[in-house]
Image (cartoon, rainbow, N blue to C red):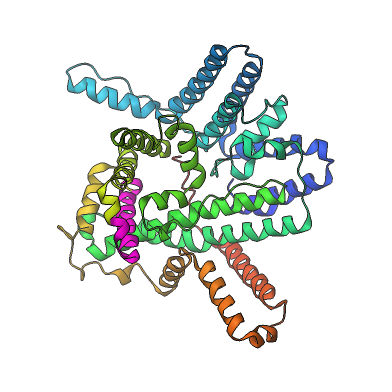
Amino acid sequence: MVFSSPIFLFLFLPLALLGNFLLPARARNAFLLAASLLFYAWGEVFYVLVMLASIAANYACGLLLARAATPRGRRLVLWAAVAFNLGLLGWFKYGGFLAANVGAALAALGFAPLPAVETHLPIGISFFTFQAMSYVIDLYRGQAAVQRSPVNLALYVSLFPQLIAGPIVRYHDVAAQLLRRHVDLDGFAEGVRRFVVGLGKKMLLANTLGEVADQIMALDPAALSAPVAWLGIGCYALQIYFDFSGYSDMAIGLGRMFGFRFLENFDHPYAAASMREFWRRWHISLSTWFRDYLYIPLGGGRAAPWRVALNLWIVFLLCGLWHGASWNFVIWGALHGLFLSLERTAFGRLVDRLWRPLRHGYVLLVVLVAWVFFRVEALPQALDYLRTMAGVGAATVKAMSVETFLPREKLLMLLAAAALALPWAPALGRARALLARRWPQAGRAVPAWGPEALRALGLLAVLGLSLLHVASATYNPFIYFRF
């Protein structure tokens, strides 16, 4: 069950909201926990037990941390919790990957290969494992108090708005909200608006452009022209942005409807003028998690230059692996780590002196090349696709034209997505202020309710079109299965 499915929109969500409002405050956490477990079990059934085991182990570690009398005892509990969480994630997500690579290495050395290891990947395990780890680490650091209610801790880990697709919510950010939260009409309305925006991003933009990307990238790269190859990866870049940010918007909106306030997760990353800025804008909850729980403990940016570069590489290699058990994900992370390291050298100072559109183009080039490894599952095919993008061995433009994949409605969505990926709100705000200063009488001629009415009509149009797509679309991928 996903947010853009009819059963969620027309059955699960209305019942969850109704129950949350009808029940007394003291019963709401238990109700939301039951709803969240049902939401997860709808798609995973047996593997909800894996999440419950994670909750139980981290709850116990939290109690042990609170009782530990010595620094050494606290460290032992912390490392036990980290080992358990990483072991759980490692077995389900990386067991088959590690066995295959160790087996290949043994076979190359003349030994008998290991038997194949097949494990099921529970949806969202990367998200709820990182959240559980943040609880224990926050306790260890003294940034939060121990949670003695197993219901409250289980709700934090399993809360359905952000369970399967993020954002990664850290315990110290919502600890007080687990105990006391309030939903008023304005907050609920803002949550609905945010959810509608996210649903529109997912259904109207991400899905439409995802169809184009899938059609192109399913073909043999030798059959593509360079422009078509660039179109394919460009559409995928916009698909993954509007899908990720759309789900984050829906999660933030759902949180507001139930009284929770989640932090922002995306801030127009494709407007960045450096890779450093890109990662301050892209998947903010993940990048800050790695920064606070790994990069800074490794020494952060205050160590010797070689150590800073090593820290960045470690973080982004692991960030790549977090996304999936594949060498292509490792290469994706390595590319980002490489350019983040280079930007701390003379190369970064050179980039900073460039005209901003050139800096912006540099970021898009790096990001698009890296997305090829993220999207294409096999390394040889990824390299073939990059060669086609570079015009090496590509088909002629006549053989495979851009127009083949871009009928008018998809072209309009591509143009709309490219425009909406940029932060227009600040520029529009400045333009509005300038017009108000120069022609104050024009502002008085517009009714006070005018902008709000237009906004409401726009949201209704987005909601209506999105629901039409929900009801009729056969293409509605859930791209988080690998995460």
Residue 43 position, x and y percent, is 57, 39
In this view, the residue in front, 24 or 446, is 446
Q: Quadrant of residue 415?
A: bottom left
The magenta span reads 351-375
The quarter of the picture where residue 181 lies is top right
Task: Assess whether residue 353 is covered by the magenta stretch.
Answer: yes
Is residue 49 shown left or right of residue 79?
Answer: right
Measured along the vertical axis of the image, is residue 18 above or below residue 443? above
Quarter occupied by the N terminus: top right
Give yes or no for residue 290 being in the magenta stretch. Answer: no
Picture quadrant where residue 62 is located: top right
Would you say 119 lies left or right of 402 here? right
Prevailing secondary structure class for the magenta stretch in the rendered image: helix
| Observer-nearest of 406 and 421 | 421
Q: Is residue 252 left or right of residue 78?
A: right
**Residue found at the very far left of the displayed protein:** 393
Please state the horizontal and vertical placement of residue 38, each as a whole percent of the image: 66, 37
Q: Nearer the viewer, residue 28 or 77?
A: 77
Find residue 238 and report its horizontal and vertical position in percent: 42, 59
Image height of 402 relative to 235, above or below: below
Q: Is residue 475 visible?
A: no
In the displayed structure, 341 sits above or below 224; it is: above
Residue 289 visible in the snapshot: yes
In the image, 317 versus 45, the foreground residue is 317
Residue 177 in the image, given as x and y percentages of width and height: 71, 40
At x 59% / y 65%, what residue is drawn?
A: 468
How many circles with numbers are drawn on the protein? 0
Q: Name the residue at 37% across, 27% down.
A: 96
Relative to residue 458, is residue 156 depicted above or below?
above
